[in-house]
Amino acid sequence: QLYGIPSLVAWYDVPKSTKVMGWFWNGKCKSKARLDGKTVVITGCNTGIGKYTVLDLYARGARVVMACRNVEKAEEARDWVIEQRSGQQGLGQLSVCHLDLSSLSSVRKCAEKLLHEESHIHILINNAGVMMCPRSLTEDGYELQFATNHLGHFLFTLILLPKIISSAPARIVNVASMAHTLCNNMNYNDINYEKSYFAAQAYGRSKAANILFTKELAKRLKGTGVTVYSLHPGVVDTELSRHLDESVTDLLYVIQAPQLLCT
């Protein structure tokens, strides 16, 4: 089951014009909840959904740690968020931490740095990801989509878990996708797709893994004050689809947003 958490994922700035239908409905979180004194760690937030989530959390007074692979772009995103909120009251704090989820050594280094520097972690949002890219293996020998979207976040979460539990009430949010329906088999016997590789199925498997991880972690953390959620963010025009042909992305928008066909 997928859980929508609009109060944590903030609002998504969906373009008002597209090549498919000419317009999209903008979605905005209506919650006015404050996050003063709360520390949020979010991955993959130099662009897209992650960046706008930071924009919202910063306005709510949270201290936000932006864990990104490209530090330069993350710093640009941080400066953009600060500029967008210029003059507003009750703002939080922003910091940047290097995190390459395709590298387990990078994951360990970032997580251990956060354990050392942060007194609390109240919210962890595992947002970063890659989608339907050409097959390649990481430095650790894992298929890129599975490694980045699942294994990296899995390790990152487990290392940070003691700090999150000690900060309870706390929550962990795993950004999944309806693309998990593309996975009809986890294919453990060919975890790296050495026999055959279908990018969409590999992406779907990584998202299915996100959901399975969420369900099991939620069970294990019952009674600790830490709640765990997964969610489908909806149809959002981001750089995540950069590996897809334009005609494919247009088709996906129509398939995933049937409400746009209504008048």
Image (cartoon, rainbow, N blue to C red):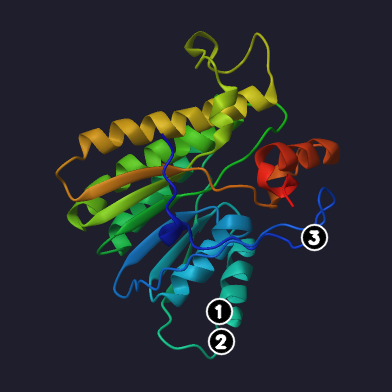
Look at mark 2 in the image and give the residue it sits on.
86
Q: Are marks 1 and 2 in contact (CB under 8 Å)?
A: yes
Residue at (30, 55) in percent of width and height: 115
Residue found at the far front of this picture: 263
Of helix, strand and loop, which one carries label 3?
A: loop
Note whether residue 43 is visible: yes
Crowd class of label 1 (few under 14; some 14 to 19; many from 20; radius 10 Å): some
Look at mark 1 in the image and give the residue it sits on.
82
**Of tags 1 and 3, which is closer to the observer?**
3
Q: Amino acid at mark 1?
A: Ile
Look at mark 3 in the image and give the residue it sits on.
17
121 to the left or right of 204: left
Residue at (26, 62) in percent of width and height: 120
Q: Nearer the viewer, residue 239 or 253?
A: 253
**Of tags 2 and 3, which is closer to the observer?**
3
Disc nearer the start of the sequence (2/3):
3
Residue at (54, 63) in percent of width and height: 11
Q: Nearer the viewer, residue 154 or 212?
A: 212
